[in-house]
Amino acid sequence: MLFPELVLASHNAGKLKELQAMLGANVRLRSVGEFSQVEPEETGLSFVENAILKARNAARLSGLPALADDSGLAVDCLGGAPGIYSARYADGLGDAANNAKLLAALKEVPDAERGAQFVCCLALVRHADDPLPILCEGLWHGSILHEARGEHGFGYDPLFWVEERQCSSAELSPADKNQLSHRAIAMELLKQRLGL
């Protein structure tokens, strides 16, 4: 089941580059931004619901099979927050504001209780009304640091401690992150499903 071309339901250039690198040269990934600047309202209450919603929207706008990634950070002691609201945790003010709000929320929390995971749900639809979306989920377990570390990545990467590498996600090279991350785990499952 090979798709030579997919539209990615995202305007995020970092996400497009990361997912294209993981997919490899056999599939061309295009941004939904080529077709429309309108973002669908993410009305789902889970990563799965929002991924399907975004994939259907991108397929409808482009006429192509669509891949959507809904991902975020789930902090255990915050009941899974920021969760599906990760990108707009600080009212849409961007990564620095999101990170500052998370650090403030965890200010009094000891190291042993700062467990978290990055979550990625990939949804692939063959067309906008596909009754059987392909769903793949990846979880990347770690914990939240007390201050930002590293220059790579985006989002919460500078605060996410990767135990097996003894560094933050933002201290990993892009190539290393693309092998370890929640997206890498979900993408590996998707590639298996697609026979890539």
Image (spheres, rainbow, N blue to C red):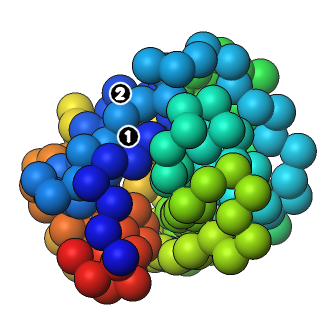
Is 34 positioned to the left or the right of 133 in the image? Answer: left
- Marks 2 and 1 close (CB-CB < 8 Å): yes
Q: Secondary structure at mark 1?
A: helix
The residue tagged 2 is 13
Inter-mark Cα distance, 2 to 1 = 5 Å
Residue 122 percent location from the top left of the image: 53, 63
Q: Secondary structure at mark 2?
A: helix
The residue tagged 1 is 15
Q: Residues within 10 Å of mark 2 (few under 14, many from 20)?
A: few
**Would you say residue 157 is visible in this rendering?**
no
Is 196 positioned to the left or the right of 83 in the image? Answer: left
Q: Residues within 10 Å of mark 1 (few under 14, many from 20)?
A: some
Residue 103 badge: none
Q: Relative to 195, is 45 above or below?
A: above
Q: Who's the residue at 69% across and 64% down the image?
A: 130
In which quadrant is the N terminus drawn?
Answer: bottom left
